[in-house]
Image: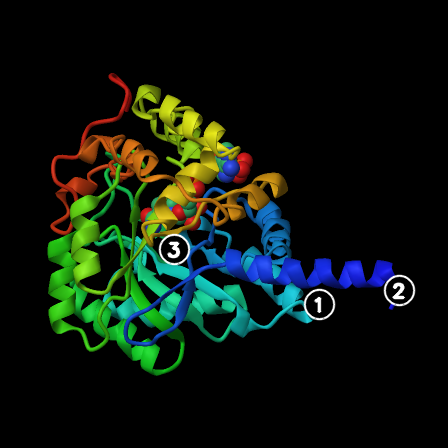
Amino acid sequence: MNCGIRVLRLAFKFQIRYYSRKMKHVKLSQTDDLMPTLGLGTWQAPSDVIETTVYKALDLGYRHIDTAFNYNNEEAIGNAIKKWIEDGKGTRKDLFITTKLPHVGNRASDVRKFLELQLSRLKMDYVDLYLIHVPFAFYCNPETLTPLIQHSGEYMLDMETNHITTWKKMEECRNDGLVRNLGLSNFNEAQILKIMKAAELKPQVLQVELHAYFQQMELRKFCSENNIVVTAYAPLGSPGAKEHFVNKYDYNPDTFPDLLGHKDVKEISEAHKKTPAQVLLNFLVAQKIVVIPKSTSEHRLQENMDIFDFDLTPAEMNRLKKLDKGEEGRIFNFLFWKGVESHPEYPFKNPKAVVMEGAQ
Ligand SMILES: NC(=O)c1ccc[n+]([C@@H]2O[C@H](COP(=O)([O-])OP(=O)(O)OC[C@H]3O[C@@H](n4cnc5c(N)ncnc54)[C@H](OP(=O)(O)O)[C@@H]3O)[C@@H](O)[C@H]2O)c1
């Protein structure tokens, strides 16, 4: 055989083996479905950009996409996935798609309505994982499907929120094949326990804010004892949230410390010839946490995938564990939805104020 062809064949074989070693999965309790440890986050990714990004990400090897009704991009993500499949690059079964029941639909009577709308936007028959996005609920403007807001700027809270009846409806949708796995997002331990006690299919995944500054040790221990996979949102410390919250909600910019620029993270990344983002993601996946970094840059999409080919030393792991600020490290407390902390199911204790003094 021609030597050049042999070299090419070997390189191709090696690439496939190398690639399959890189893509890791976690098994979900109760269904044994495999969830890729790395997913693509899509919050703040506008529709016109995310369509190209998702197509590129799938080409690069991403198989897990995280979206939500509230991100207003399910339609574009659905277009990208449909095209990718039609182009013969893979099948629906190769993919793991997560989306979320919004705060305005967090009630039993709305579950199926929202899920069916989301599936039609995503152009698929089922999603792999459906999460209740937040434990609280707002009344919904039926025309815009956005929260109703009072003249004072306060959100209109639906105080009748009942997680058990909502969950039962989600189970029903699952039995009807609209979704394969069920989970929660931004719920606290007591709220999860209550659902677990009443559930036929227990929550399999909990998606929460989790990064080196906010490591959620207690909640993670609880999840591990109950076979709940933890997905870390904002795994890089959500650098894009700063601009969004400062501009849109008058947050104090000082409440967003720069995790990617932290001295320890930078030193560890230099030691491994990796980037700070790769170190922060590796730190989490090494602890069996699913990560869903968001990027719309092709370069960073690739960068965020190349996280499985190095090991942090125990000393480096400990150094990063020490960056945990506990509750002080939380960025997403949802107080930007004015009045939300008065909802009986608001999940966090003593959320810190982050709005600029004098701001409305
Ligand atoms: N369940 C919930 O309530 C909830 C809340 C927040 C987020 N989420 C989910 O979790 C995902 C991730 O969270 P997130 O988007 O807030 O934060 P993140 O993934 O920690 O950070 C994303 C930001 O970092 C930048 N970035 C990405 N890769 C980078 C790299 N290698 N080096 C430097 N900068 C990089 C991105 O900019 P570029 O795009 O320009 O690269 C973007 O501004 C979301 O997209 C969403 O899917 C869920």
Q: How many marks?
A: 3
Q: What number is the disc on residue 87?
A: 1
Q: Nearer the viewer, residue 326 or 282?
A: 282
Relative vertical location of residue 348 with respect to residue 224 in this rendering, above or below: above
Q: Is residue 347 visible?
A: no
Q: What number is the disc on residue 76?
A: none
- Picture quarter with ligand 1: top left
Inter-mark Cα distance, 1 to 2: 32 Å
- Residue kind at label 1, given as amino acid type: Asp
Q: Nearer the viewer, residue 13 or 221?
A: 13
Inter-mark Cα distance, 3 to 1: 33 Å
What element does badge 1 sit on? loop
**Residue at (62, 67) in percent of width and height:** 82
Q: Considering only order in the chain, which callout, 1 or 3, is on the residue closer to the N terminus? A: 1
Residue at numbered disc 2: 2
Residue at numbered disc 3: 145
Inter-mark Cα distance, 3 to 2: 62 Å
Q: Nearer the viewer, mark 3 or mark 1?
A: 1
